[in-house]
Amino acid sequence: MDGVSIIGVGMIPFGKYPDRKLADLGWPAVKAAVRDAGIEPRRIQAAFCGTALGGMMSGQRVLGRLGLTGIPITNVENACSSSSSAFRQGVVAIQSGQYDAVLVIGVEKLTKFGGGTLPLEEEDWEVRLGLSMPALYAMRAQRYMHDFGLTREQLALVSVKNRKHGALNPDAQMRKPVTVEEVLASRAISDPFTLLQCCPTGDGAAAIVLSATSIAREYRSDPIQVLASDLTSGKFTTGFRDMTIPEITVRGAKEAYEHAGVGPDDIDVAEVHDAFSIAELLYYEAFGFCGRGEAGRFLESGSTTFGGTVVVNPSGGLLSKGHPVGATGAAQVVEIVRQLRGEAGERQVEGAKVGLTHATGGGISGFDHGACAIHILAR
């Protein structure tokens, strides 16, 4: 099997675009990625488009605007892991020898729902009983605080850090820094969460051009290598679930590290799925960045910001960059690629050589999460 490299990335700033159609969001990101790769569009042999709520034939609608049609286009839905799952499909397609160059798209338009929490499936019995995503993560936070003594101030620090990072990112939806006091004083959502501890929804798009490593330098002198592309699904569990251990991420991280031949100490920069403040803390432990119950102190020590041992969510993460669900996984890859190339500007992680992206998806009764996609990239 051939190796896989990333030769082009592009995205639009995340935000609210009520007057734009889904295709209008997607095509500029694709055009930017193709231009960044220096590849002729006709050399792209297939496309994989991730969207959770964008409707039928999203990829065809986006690529139709650019005349990039007639190639195989596969649309992928996997909740918040949609475009990161599409990325994996692109990786596998090249590894198998089927294609030399493919396009991955993530695109979503959530302003069409008019605000509020994401619509979930009413046939799920936990959803029918009112278990929205803020409520689910709030239960995780309450349990973790009970078990490990995490304080509300430490929990709020996740939002403070990520807003500080997002202020340096021109593609972030929320770019105003906040203090612990402002986070705690913002509107209550689901105890212990306040508004500033919940990611904003919105619209966005990101795109990636992948190629076989054997030809990557025909297009760029600095291709980024895909060391691991791992997708796992949740295990159905009846009865008690320990909500402080994200089982699907623990399992996925172990697989990804094994595939890449690296460990937690090798990761310089990571984009993780911080949909709510507690999530980032749980993922510090799941990825082995710190020990069990140590996440609050690890954050407080400065270990996950610039100059720390592993910089987590330099883009601002979902809490600052925003979370247009189907676009998030692809946008995480765009950020890590820019970091590894040294193109991240004011938020550049000095000396970054190995990076990680992580997107979980789906709140379903009996599961930790429905899906989890983890990618490890290196320069």
Image (cartoon, grey):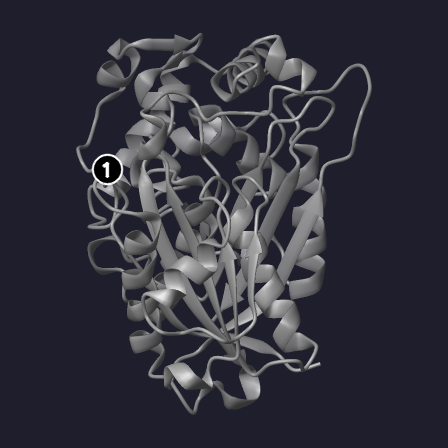
Q: Can residue 231 be seen in this snapshot?
A: yes
Name the residue: 66% across, 26% down.
364
Q: Could you say which is closer to the camera, residue 352 or residue 166?
A: 166
- From the top left corner, tell me how far across and down residue 344 is, in percent: 27, 60
Q: Could you say which is closer to the camera, residue 310 or residue 40?
A: 40
Query: Quadrant of the image for the N terminus?
Result: bottom right
Residue 292 in the image: above or below residue 66: above
Q: Quadrant of residue 164?
A: top left
Question: Going by the image, does 133 lie left or right of 185?
Answer: right
Name the residue: 57% across, 40% down.
360
Name the residue: 47% across, 50% down.
329
Residue occupied by mark 1: 18
Please state which amino acid type lies under the numbered disc 1.
Pro
Q: Could you say which is closer to the camera, residue 264 or residue 358?
A: 358
Question: Going by the image, does 285 lie left or right of 268?
Answer: right
Instruction: Determine crowd level at label 1: few under 14, some 14-19, many 20+ residues with C-alpha closer than 10 A.
Output: few
